[in-house]
Image: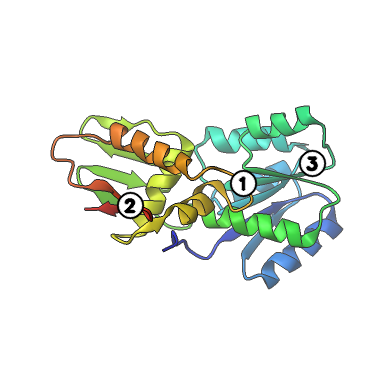
Amino acid sequence: MECSSAVPAVLIVEDDANLRLALEDNLRDEGYAVQVAATVKAAREALLSPPDVVVLDLMLPDGDGYALCRELRAKGLPSRVLMLTARTLEDDLVKGFEAGADDYLAKPYRLKELLARVAALARRAPTSRETVTHSLGVFTVDEATRTVTGPAGEVELTRKEFDLLVCLARAGDKVVTRDAILDAVWGSDVVVDTHTVDNFVSSLKKKLRAPRAGFELKTVRGVGFRLVR
């Protein structure tokens, strides 16, 4: 069982017209709904309706991608961000992830690799074109705002904890394997031990503990997990 998601939308923020057009054509051919922006200003306007994935160049005529990514995260937008840059120094990579990027790809890039990375991010992205909420007993999970609220108010979850909870909530009462969770939450190109999933589920159980909670995160021995309402 995989964590399902809607058909994704992608925003390309790139000032090079040739690269922008090539990316737009290839992503449309892959079936994505594509928007483009050549400036920070145009990107801000496009982000009023947050896409699932933002393909973000760092060097833009009216600003830089780091600042735009930090702005996106400060507003709580759920979009996944793939940064594109000619900068490959370790400090630049760290700066990108600290700004809130989900992935990083150096120019010149291989098209197949870029498409694979966009697809991986899209699988992990919440549905951004509609309000999606999940009722888990006394808790409510809102994908658009990335919040979980319960009897005592908002529950503070890490990004991975929230994505894991959404993954299980989307699956209904079906079992989700550890491998499917790793693919949906961490990405298929990231090497993570399967025991990491168990640790995150354990953390969720502690944070979502409440009298008569109305649901349970159940371990299916040797397979994975399922959310029992």
Q: Amino acid at mark 3?
A: Leu
Residue 43 x %, y %: 66, 47
Q: Which residue is mark 3?
A: 60
| Left or right placement of residue 17 versus residue 100 in this view | right
Residue 186 x %, y %: 54, 46
The residue drawn where x is 79% and y is 41% is 60
Labelled pair 3, 2 in contact (Cβ < 8 Å): no
Query: For this rendering, which residue is in front, 178 or 205?
Result: 178
Label 2 neighbour load within 10 Å: few <14, some 14-19, many 20+: few
Q: Amino acid at mark 2?
A: Arg
Label 1 neighbour load within 10 Å: few <14, some 14-19, many 20+: few
Q: Which residue is mark 2?
A: 221
Where, by quadrant of the figure, is residue 117 drawn?
A: bottom right
Q: Amino acid at mark 1?
A: Val
Q: Which residue is mark 1?
A: 190
SS category of the residue bearing label 1: loop
**Separation (CA) of disc 1 from disc 2:** 24 Å
Where, by quadrant of the figure, is residue 174 drawn?
A: bottom left
Give the numbered dot on residue 176.
none
**Separation (CA) of disc 3 from disc 1:** 29 Å
